[in-house]
Image (spheres, rainbow, N blue to C red):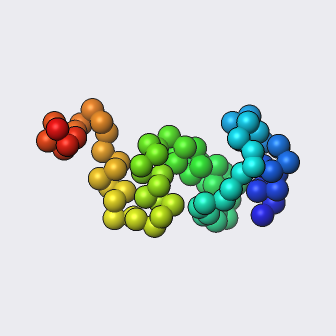
Amino acid sequence: MRRIKQHQSGEGANFTKKRLPVKLVYLEEHKRIASAFYREKSVQKWRRQKKEALIYGQHQKLPELSKSYRNLKPQDEGT
C-alpha cells in the first residue's frame, strides 16, 4: 500500500507521474527490494498481450506469448 500511495502522490517514475491516478491490477510480493525491482523491470518489457495474461491469471498462455516476433512462422502469426 505504501508503494501505491507514493505513486498516487506523484513520487517515483516520470512515466507514472504522467498517468495519474494509478490503479492496481496485479500484485506480487517479494522479500527483497532488489528482486521486486528486477521483476518489475522484466514485466515492463513484455508486450501488452503477455501482461494481460499475467493480470488475468492466464498463466498457461505465458509460454506462447513469450515467443519473439522474429521467431514466429507466417502460419503462427495468423496469416
Vertical comparison of 77 with 53: above or below:
above
**How far across and down, in percent of the image, does residue 1 sit?**
78, 64
Q: Is residue 34 visible?
A: yes
* Number of numbered discs on residues: 0
x 64%, y 49%: residue: 37
Residue 13 visible (yes or no): no
Give the quarter of the figure containing the C terminus.
Answer: top left
Residue at 40 percent across and 65 percent down: it is: 58
Indicate the position of residue 45 as horizontal and vertical percent values: 50, 40
As rendered, which of 27 and 37 lies closer to the eye?
27
Left-right relation of 12 to 28: right
Horizontally, residue 27 falls left or right of residue 22, namely left
Q: Position of residue 67 (x, y in %)?
A: 30, 45
Above-or-below relation of 56 to 13: below
Q: Which residue does the image show at 48% across and 52% down from the upper left?
A: 51
Outermost residue, left direction?
A: 75
Residue 74 at x, y = what percent?
16, 36
| Residue 70, quarter of picture | top left
Residue at horizontal 66 percent and vertical 59 percent from the top: 24
Q: Is residue 55 left or right of residue 18?
A: left
Q: In the figure, is residue 53 to the left or right of 21? A: left
Between residues 46 and 35, which one lies in front from this camera angle? Answer: 46
